[in-house]
Amino acid sequence: MSKVYTLSEVAKHATCDSCWVIYNDKVYDVTEFMADHPGGDDLILDYAGKDVTAVMKDVLEHDHSEAAYEILEDYCIGSIDKLKADKEMGASLLHRRRMQLLEEEEESKTYHQQDFHPSETDVTMDIKRNQFLDLRKALVPQMFRARFTKEFYLEQVHKPRYLSKPAIFFGHPLLEPLSKTAWYMVPIIWLPYTGYHLWKSLAFSMPVATGMSFALGVLIWTLLEYVLHRFLFHLDDLLPDHQIAFLLHFTLHGFHHYLPMDRLRLVMPPALACVLAYPLVSLGHFLFPPMVAHGVIAGGFFGYILYDMTHYYLHHAKVISLHFREMKKYHMAHHYKNYEDGYGITSKIWDYCFGTVLRYTA
């Protein structure tokens, strides 16, 4: 029985080292054949990981003999799952439409520049043209009263705008200050907490074990950074089709994609950080003995501090070349080219592990 593949599985094999194509709903591994292809390997690579049915039948593109089709059969490794393919095609079309909206923006062509700075949004024209939110007024009350379709909300909230000053979030004199956090508040608040747990771990007089626990905590944070960004902040397609769900999404992370350069909403407010951290700290104490738990928690919070500082740095600095220049380009591409990939902020390691690396040409 031949193996069944999905379109996304085939699409991953699009290199010289592993080249698959689809013809008439069958999957072919043509890696070995590339060197012998009469039209050259470049022609095959142009269609690597894709469906070549229409191309092979197009005599103007490349007329194939009967022998060519017989040779192709030698490389058949399976077939396409039609049910999943239909679903993936629907998701693919939706993805392309969303990304085309970003391509219309000037920033999609300039995001990779070292001195990148978006153009200020004409707020009057923006509300007239898009009928989404009025940037001159408090945004959360507008979200609470609005009645958007799910797709309209997702398209608009991921279409970046820019204001020269912080937007009005709640519009309430007591709540508004709570929505703003200066970048330096993160180390001021969380470094002492990190130091406390490190001290508690070192009190067991096992410095090597403490160091290893701390390193484990940093590693755990890098995975947590990815998981939170991808599966909580970008819940997007699994978001319930309800205005309250849109409001929660907007408050948690949608706002950041809507106004990605708002300086006072780039790092996590301490109150929200506490809400997210409490169950994780409790889990750490449950899973590990005290000495290890304190070391892991210290490393985790240190990783979080580095994450928030890196995030702010990538958005608002002309970064140094070593590592950060590439990560700035990578993260800006997440905002201005494709927000459905590229979830790593401090590094790409988990994007590589889970197949969500963001590809771009700039």
Image (cartoon, rainbow, N blue to C red):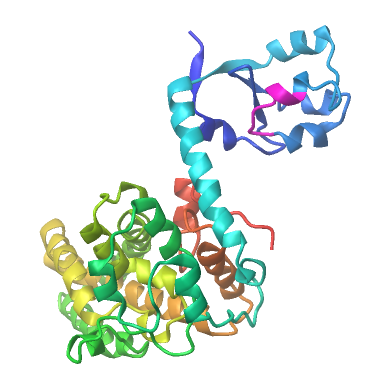
Q: Main secondary structure of the magenta part?
A: loop
Does residue 301 appear anywhere in the picture? no
Task: Report whether 254 appears left or right of 47.
Answer: left
* Picture layout, residue 203 above or below residue 93: below
Q: Is residue 92 above or below residue 224?
A: above
* Residue 338 percent location from the top left of the image: 53, 57
- For residue 243, what is the image quadrant? bottom left
Residue lying at 37% horizontally and 59% vertically, measured from the top left: 153
Q: Nearer the viewer, residue 162 or 53?
A: 162
Q: How many marks?
A: 0
The answer to whether residue 295 is left or right of residue 229 is: left
The residue lying at 29 percent from left, 91 percent from top is 188
Q: Magenta stretch containing residue 264, yes or no?
A: no
The answer to which quarter of the image holds residue 101 is bottom right
Identify which residue is drawn at 64% across, 32% down: 50
- Pick out the residue farthest to the front: 128
Instruction: Report x, y in % for residue 300.
Output: 29, 69
**Magenta region includes residue 54:** yes
Quadrant of the image occupied by residue 220? bottom left
Report the span colored magenta. 48-55
